[in-house]
Image (cartoon, grey):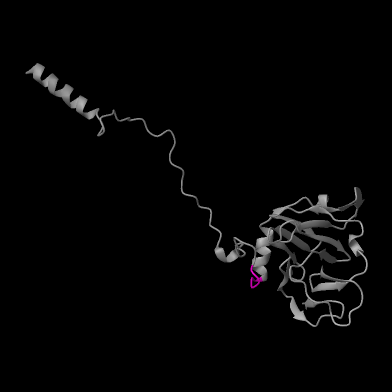
Amino acid sequence: MRIAGLLAVSVLVAACSQSVGGQAESSQPSSSPPPPPSTQPSVSPSTQGPAAPSGAPAATASIDEVIAWIEAGTPADAESFHVTFRDGVTTRLGEETAFVAASGTPHSYTQCITGAGTLTCLLDLTSPPPRPAQAEGQWKPGWIEFSGTDLTVGALRGDPGPFLNGSGAELPAGQSLTFGDTRCRSDVSGLYCVNYAHRGAVRIAADGVAPYGCLAETAAPPEAAARFSC
């Protein structure tokens, strides 16, 4: 009887030491308790600005959508865009900014430069506006001037104006550049710029120029093809 009792105890101990899967269960407690659930409040969608569209803004995009998309670009080093280049000569611009960006047409670029609070850009348009009636001088349909509250397309220019010393460095597609109250983002489809002070924006591309925000079409001056104002 004593031997039978000892055998029964041994069998019971062996059975208790086996897990369901056949491995020995560990009686050791977890080295650290599971982390408590986060108590940090989530950001309310209503407090966030609009998400940047996956593609470049359409002509019907709101100014907030345009701003969000421009701000989603990778910021470029502004110090690299205070010079122009022409025939191997480098000209320093001080506080002014110059750059070139894709125009949406292969092997074609938009060149831009700032001055007196205005961004002036020049490019070849695929469907240029006609020369204004009775206009005199050399007609440059792709001459764009954007101040934030005013946008003009086309100009009568007999001289290179602010482009006398050449063009600036390239702003690669996907990057943004900030100067004064304005930020521009380059894209393979064209250049997009916004003026924060007045919430006016513009798309400059070979296939056309489009205004956003406060800019609305007004009567064009004799020396321009189109004008938009806030």
Relative to 205, say whether 18 is above or below.
above
Nearer to me, 84 or 137:
137
State the image quarter where residue 62 is shown.
bottom right
What segment carries the magenta color?
58-62
Asked whether 64 or 151 is in front, the reply is 151
Q: Position of residue 17 (x, y in %)?
A: 25, 27
Q: Quadrant of residue 43?
A: bottom right
Any magenta on residue 61?
A: yes
Assign the C terminus to one quadrant of the image: bottom right
Judge whether 55 appears above or below 83 on screen: below
Q: Quadrant of the N terminus?
A: top left
Residue drawn 71% across the image and 68% down it: 207
Most common SS among magenta residues: loop
Query: Left of 55 or right of it: where is 30?
Result: left
Vertical comparison of 59 with 112: above or below: below
Total marks shown come to 0
Can you give x and y, in whole percent of width and height, for residue 21 in the image?
26, 33
Q: Nearer the viewer, residue 44 or 123?
A: 123
Residue at image x 93%, y 66%? 159
* Position above or below: 21 against 205: above
**Can residue 173 be found in the magenta stretch?**
no
The single residue placed furthest to the left in the displayed view is 1
Query: x, y percentage for residue 225?
Result: 81, 77
Q: Say which of 177 and 22 sits in front.
A: 177
Q: Residue furthest top?
A: 3
Please give the name of the residue rendered at 77% of the width and 50% of the height, measured from the top-left corner: 77
Relative to 86, 191 lies left or right: left
Provide residue 157's location: percent of width, then percent of height. Answer: 90, 70
